[in-house]
Image: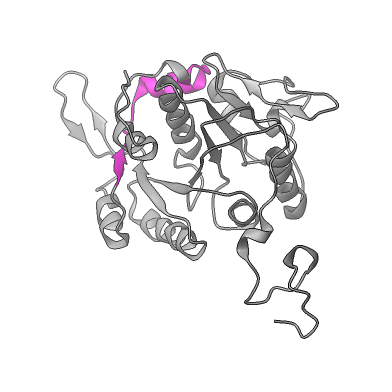
Amino acid sequence: MSENCTHDCSTCSENCASRDPKSMLEQLHEMSSVKKVIAVISGKGGVGKSLVTALMATIMQRAGFKTAVLDADITGPSIPRLFGVDGQSAEADGFGVYPVRSKTGIDLMSINLLLENPADPVIWRGPVIAGTVKQFWTEVIWENEDIMFIDMPPGTGDVPLTVFQSIPVDGIIVVTSPQELVKMIVEKAVKMAGMMNIPVLGIVENMSYFECPECHAQHKIYGESHVDEIAKTYGILNVAKLPVNPKLAAASDAGLIELFEGNWLDKLAESICGEAVKNG
């Protein structure tokens, strides 16, 4: 503690041991209400983090929960494409910015909903990117959301740290793939969650297997799974495995993710909402 401490953390820039971590939380827009926030993270890119975010949001919306997705992956936004809402479609007025609503009513906010051309790269430095994520929380009007999923950028850098310190995250879903190399990277993400005192609600292994449509035999194209081993090591109770599924890939490419059929994530969804969900 500084000898000049005023005991008012909101006016102090010192990073001392007595600082209340909650003092760094950003306030929601005065017209917003978000009951629960779940961050979807991965230790590396390309493992299907945005897909899992979109699937979880769809499941929750189908179960009757008012659902939102905040796309915090500013330099690699995928959420608009998955939901088929690409384009400069977010609107603003004197009160704030309004999320774009998907076909089934999921509220979405992503940098690609603000760009004139979604293919334009976002070439910003870390502090600007982190500031934009904060603005998505503080300046967007999230109206009566039961649950918000935050699609995080890969890794454990600036933006994940900003989200965990600035937004009251209730839990984390970690997304991985079967390769041995990924095991170490997943452990980094899990350990970061522990350091931030945020519970890991589950691990989702994407591309876990391919199921033959004729004989229904499962083939582990990308190698043996390590997700159960990791979950046991860190006491994570919920494990889900997503297959390599051509229909799921086609729905993603066509912006029709809300039409997917499959129950791979239902148990994880039930653990989050505390009640049974019914999904195609």
Q: Is residue 255 magenta?
A: yes
Position above or below: 252 against 172 = above
Outermost bottom residue: 3
**Residue 79 appears left or right of 125:** left
Residue drawn at (53%, 24%), measured in percent from left and top? Answer: 82
**Could you tell me which quadrant the C terminus lies in?**
top left
261 and 223: which is toward the camera: 261
Tell me: 196 left or right of 70.
Answer: left
Is residue 7 among what the camera can see?
A: yes
Task: Give the x, y percent position of residue 67.
Answer: 52, 28
- Which stretch did the figure color magenta? 238-257
Above or below 168: residue 81: above
Give the residue drawn at x 33%, y 38%: 268
Q: Quadrant of residue 120?
A: top right
Q: From the top left corner, tell me how far across and down residue 84 is, in percent.
A: 58, 18
Q: Quadrant of residue 97?
A: top right
Judge left or right: residue 98 versus residue 238: right
Quadrant in the rendering for residue 100: top right
Which of the image's four quarters has the N terminus? bottom right
**Residue 198 x %, y %:** 47, 56
Q: Is residue 114 visible?
A: no
| Total numbered labels | 0
Residue drawn at the location 74% of the way across and 21% of the way down: 88
Q: Residue at x 60, y 36 (%)?
A: 70
Q: Position of residue 59 (x, y in %)?
A: 40, 26
Between residues 103 and 51, which one lies in front from this camera angle? 103
Left or right, 237 with respect to 107, comes to: left
Which residue is the extreme one toward the right? 94
> Of residues 60 and 251, which is closer to you in this image?
60
